[in-house]
Amino acid sequence: MAFPEPRPQLPQLPQHLLKTLDCQQGAVRAVRFNADGNYLLSCGSDKSLKLWSASRGTLLKTYSGHGYEVLDADGSYDNSQLCSCSSDKTVILWDVATGQVTRKLRGHAGKVNCVQFNEEATVILSGSIDGTVRCWDTRSRRFEPIQVLDEARDGISSIKVAQHELLTGSVDGRVRRYDLRMGQLHVDFISSPITCVCFSQDGQCTLSSSLDSTVRLLDKSTGEMLGEYKGHKMKGYKLDCCLSSKDTHVLSCSEDGHVYCWDLVEGSLSLKLPVGKAVVQSLSFHPTETCLLTAMEGRVQVWGAEPEETEEDTVAT
Amino acid sequence: MASDSDSDEDFVSYGTPLEPLEEDEPLKKPVPLHEQTVKDEKGRYQRFHGAFTGGFSAGYFNTVGTKEGWAPSTFVSSRQQKAEKHHVRPEDFMDEEDFGEHGIAPKEITTSQEFSSGRRDEIREKARAVNAQAALIPGDTLLEELIAPARLSIGVELLRRMGWKEGQGVGPRVKRKARRQQTDGGSRVYGCVLPPAGSEDSEDQDDDEEFAPEDVTFAPKDETPVDFTPKVGVQGLGYRGLDPGMALLGRGAPEHIDLFRPQSEARSRLFGGAQRGSRRGGVAGQAFGVGAMEDDDDEEVYHRDSMSRYDTVLGGEEPGDGLYGWTAPQQYTKKRDASYLGKILEGFTLAQKPADEKTIFPPPDLPRDYRPVHHFRPSVDVSVLSGVSPALAEALRASRGHMVKEEEPQQGGRHQLDSGRRRTLLGEDALQGGVQGGRQISILINHIDQISIYQISPAGRSAVGGSASCGLQQDALAAWKGVQTSSQTFRPFEKNPSKQARYELYLNRLKQGDKDALEQSLDPAVTEWERSRERDEFVRASILYRPSSSSLSSRFTSARQQEDEDSVEVSRDQEGDVDDKQAAVNMKMFGKLTRETFEWHPDKLLCKRFNIPVPYPGSGVVGLPKVKRDKFSVFNFLTVTESRDSSAPPNPPEPGKRSRWDVSDQKKREEEAKKNDPLSELLSAARNQTETRLEQTSVSEPADFTEQEEEEEEEEEEESRPPMDLFKAIFAGSSDEKSSSSSEGDSNDEEDVKDAGEQPLNLFNVASSSVASSSAVASSSSAVSSSVEEEEEEEEEEFGPKLPPPSAASLSTEKGQFIIKRLS
């Protein structure tokens, strides 16, 4: 007796505000989930990096040691280490539990825009405004980077790592993909300065948002454009974009205080999430669930698919 | 081995049996590890040395690890005891275990399987013995007991039980008659020994005619007995040398009875076979032909086997008459229609003339430098000319391609020739007065003359006239005449040694003041147009790299490492034209047009950290592969102020590139500035003008005449001095028009300065009204714009996309106050 398959549930969107965290660290420059999505990191303009519990919204740890505002952060796969980069031209590797600086990596000539661990947290990759990507070794005590990728002709605004591939977006309007296994560098010309790049979860596509208020989905292997998403406003600020956890939707920050959410295939706007009046600076999608983090000014907001009525009620009462 | 008496005599038990378990017995304590010891027969503890290093007994009487373990036997002088030989046998190093029942050298007498009977069932043997005693012939099994065979495989044993004998085939029995028919084509056999033929020859070959009973069947003989003749001698396999015994007696030395050699005479005699013809004397073998003593001439000595010995039928009848196969004699196959005989359909005859052979045209020859891969990289062929500076290469190419690849000048396909050279090849007349290239040069010379670039050389100006190359030659002569320094500073044709040698010869002649230095130093072997091209190259090179005056050069010593100073590292693969990509982006044609792929070498350690194999093992390169390219460029000679690295990489940022990330801001700023300042209006007007002019030059004319006409235009416009654009058009090619700006620093402040930089640079400080005014405009406007910017952004210089304003602090404080208010 074969029952018919249950109809696939429509992909849900994080449209209900679950929590608002007032980070108390100036403007939140970036907000990131950790590898499993249980914790979140907020990078503040007051030189501090904070670790929060995503489910309870409590502050777990504050990491201070940067000399200027923190611009990006990432957590290792085993949650034992954090890395963060800052306008003070340094990249810091943190020990999560003790909050101590494990290593402070100097070498960039300008402020460091983005930082990322590789899969095994053996290498930290940082992209700076000086146009270089530096690969730092976390295993050895060397203070020089393993390799400096200086192919970009302008500042690096975003960097992502997936397995053996390195995706960088640069202000010179090019998305570069370094394939370490093949030993090849693929350069895709977008012409407008890139603010954020992403890999899709299946690793077949790249997403890049640029300052012409467009998010483009490119085929990774050929560079052909698969989708173009417009409607938001991204003219001057370095704002984030991302894909949902199941690659169903494309999300992007906007300068008009909304998060725009497009259907990936159809390209139609499926949700315009009002976050606030100011610029939505950063966003991060939960690696597995339908959960979204947005950062606007000093607040981080957690959005989910289902309204969390119980806690809301208890808070209200 | 212990076998019980009656009940289970089949079982053989080793070791001590476990004690029977009792149900209500308490569980025994496991023996702790230190009590698990092994003792030998005498109660001594045995040490375990490891499973593969001796087990429990290692060394001579288990002496490994002890004090006397492996102690060498003490040296005993053999002086007195020479006769007594000291023998060391392997048994000396064995202990009693090795000699024991399960040791490696058992001393006890045990049964060996080799000689045991095939069956070991004692009971049945007993029974058979009893049966034998009771049988008709007593002692039937005695023979078998006496000579028990060696062990046989079960398959052989089974076959034997079924009545099979060795040397006999397996299968249904056959009648003799049927088999005879197959072998009837029987061979005429000559010679002393026949090659061992398979199944068909047997002892009963001859005498079966008389003895062929109907009802007797024979076992098939599909098993060929193997001829185990040992190979003696050093001849090749299958070679049979002369048999001297055969030659002398007509019969070999008394052969032993060879049962296996099928055709051996002795064997046939043994089986009573009739003698087949009398044997003749004489020498036969592979080494000799027909001897003089041979009376039988038609005997085939060399060709022993006949066609009938081969199985000629394979799946059907042969074509033709079936007399011969494909190995038919030559005259047989020559007759064409033989194979058609009897096969021609009615109403058809064979053609008298053979059908026309199909002419097969060979595929066209590919050019030698043809590569089946097309790269959309316009800069690739520039790298071929790495011996010469890129600017020079561009210049030479721009002037009607008088310098293609130097390595193989004549190999270039016809597509590499331009119209002028093709005309030269075809011998057509030039369009208007001289070769077009010459005309080009003359125009160039006019300009050069006008800007008096040769003012340094005193005789330079006088020479310009009729033929361009002639004038240039004069220049070169003037430049090089009397130069005594023999140190060759620049070798433009290093890739081609013979050409370089010719060039040096030419230079030497120039130094001596030889008038027709050029003609003498050219290679007389090459074609005319090639020579003319080389002539041009030499003249140009000699002018470009002419020596500095001797008084000046005597003050300097040449550097040791010349190459390093004259070359810069440029990445090998350079990005293609940005204009095309921009167009593609505008048309949203992402993909091939916007993608470029480079070879990129990750660091070895990086690969290790990423846990992937190194993609280019063995290459020491990290990053993009670089090539050295010399830094000599025309601009190095023309401009003093320009920085070195700005001229090195020809990476032109296109004018559309000005629309940077902050283009909107910039425009806004401009607009604001426009409101404020009349000067900025002027600037924008000037910029528009240059843009339109650029467009004009690129769009309006057909491609072939663009540069030329442009030059003429410019000529008309500014008589006093040709603009920088012209030099760039000549020396740097069209794509370099925009490359004067420095590398993309991309600050807001630099933007306007850059725009100004795209105007013609005033390199020579020649007072030209328009240029001066524009530069003034540029400088002032940049100052204005920077001041505007300073007003706008007070904080710090910002690169790239900005971060949103951190208004959170104020907001939060407000909120905090608000909350406090509410609370209070």
Image (cartoon, rainbow, N blue to C red):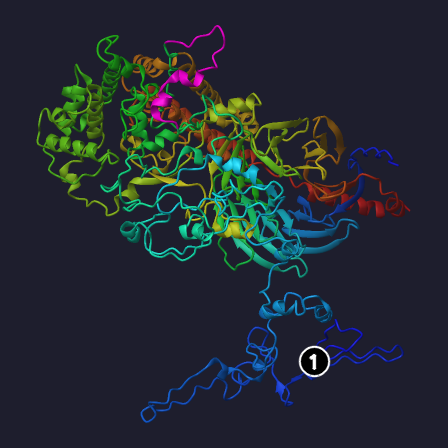
- Left of B188 or right of it: where is A117? right
Horizontal and vertical percent for residue B486? 13, 39
Asked whether residue A5 is in view, the answer is yes
Q: Circle 1 is placed at which residue position?
A: B33
- Left of B776 or right of it: where is B170? right
Residue drawn 8% across the image and 32% down it: B512
Mark 1: few/some/many CA within 10 Å (<14, 14-19, 20+): few
The boundaries of the magenta stretch are B328-352
In this view, the residue in front, B96 or A239, is B96
In the image, residue B514 sits, relative to residue B614, either above or below, namely: above
Decide whether residue A11 is among the magenta residues. no
Residue drawn 46% across the image and 81% down it: B89
In the image, residue A81 sits, relative to residue B106, either above or below, namely: above
Horizontal and vertical percent for residue B206? 47, 43
Decide whether residue B337 is among the magenta residues. yes
Chain under label 1? B
Per the image, label 1 sits on a secondary structure element best described as helix
In this view, the residue in front, B718 or A112, is A112
Q: In the rendered structure, which amino acid carries the disc numbered 1?
A: Leu
Horizontal and vertical percent for residue B499? 20, 32
- Left of A44 or right of it: where is B815? right
Magenta-highlighted stretch: main secondary structure?
Answer: loop
Instruction: Find the residue positioned furthest to the bottom.
Output: B80
In this view, the residue in front, A143 or B404, is B404
In the image, residue B229 sits, relative to residue A310, either above or below, namely: below
Horizontal and vertical percent for residue B564? 30, 44
Asked whether residue B460 is in view, the answer is no
- Left of B195 or right of it: where is B412? left
